[in-house]
Amino acid sequence: MENSPLPRMAERFRGFLPVVVDVETGGFDCTRHALLEIAAVPIELDGDGYYVPGDTVSSHVEPYPGSEIDPRSLEVTGIRLDCLLRGALPEREALDHVFAKVRAAVKRNGCQRAILVGHNAHFDLGFLNAAVTRVGHKRNPFHPFSTFDTVTLAGMAYGQTVLSRAVQAAGLPWDGDQAHSAVYDTERTAQLFCAVLNRWRQFSEQDLAAAHQD
């Protein structure tokens, strides 16, 4: 067992690279509400074969023309659209910036494409796909409909489905003052995803070791 080679990431998920994504938006409807922030963290393997978060890439996004913004969403996220320091990019440029980093991570890990990991992943993928369609982006590295959802994984592993509670149940820190920013939520979700997968690996290795002893 100790001399067996560790599988590469490309061999773990059928050639897909898990990439954690979180978006902050102007509402719940991806067909009419604005995409305001996006962040992504590729999942890597360390030298011992454990899952670890990679480098974060993010962008603030200018609301696309004709989009709607619910003021209640801005109250939750704390986003100030009139702040000059926000440095928001048009949707196409924001996607180019994030996608370039994701494609580089996919190539570095020998994978074929990325698969989105999210907490309520269908929400993030919906806004991502809607933005891709609006700008006619031809180099979207993400699978168009398959995802990994940390709601399900955390419910199975820790009995918690709310992100803050699941993160803390995994023994990880949580700062409520930083929550609801795309970068913070993405990085915490990435840590949670890695914690679940590494926990599963440890259980699997214990079961294998026990089987060899029998």
Image: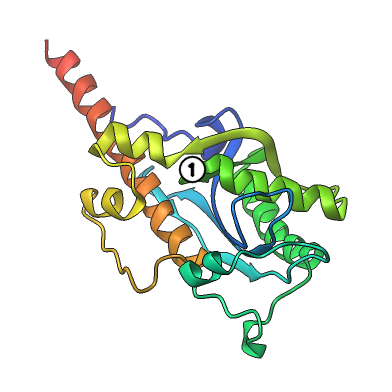
Residue placed furthest toward the left: 214
- Circle 1 sits in a helix, a strand or a loop, which is it? loop
Question: Which quadrant of the figure contains the C terminus?
Answer: top left
Q: Residue at x 26, y 57 (%)?
A: 172
Q: Residue at x 61, y 64 (%)?
A: 70
Outermost residue toward the top in this view: 214
Q: Nearer the viewer, residue 128 or 2?
A: 128
Q: In this rendered view, identify the residue nearer to me: 123 or 11.
A: 123
Q: Can you tell which quarter of the image residue 98 is in? A: bottom right
- For badge 1, the amino acid type reads Asn
**Residue 182 visible in the picture:** yes
**Residue at the image position 33 percent from the left and 32 percent from the top:** 3
Quarter assignment of residue 2? top left
Instruction: Reply above or below: 113 against 209.
Output: below
Which of the image's four quarters has the N terminus?
A: top left
* Circle 1 residue: 120
Single out the residue that lies furthest toward the front: 71
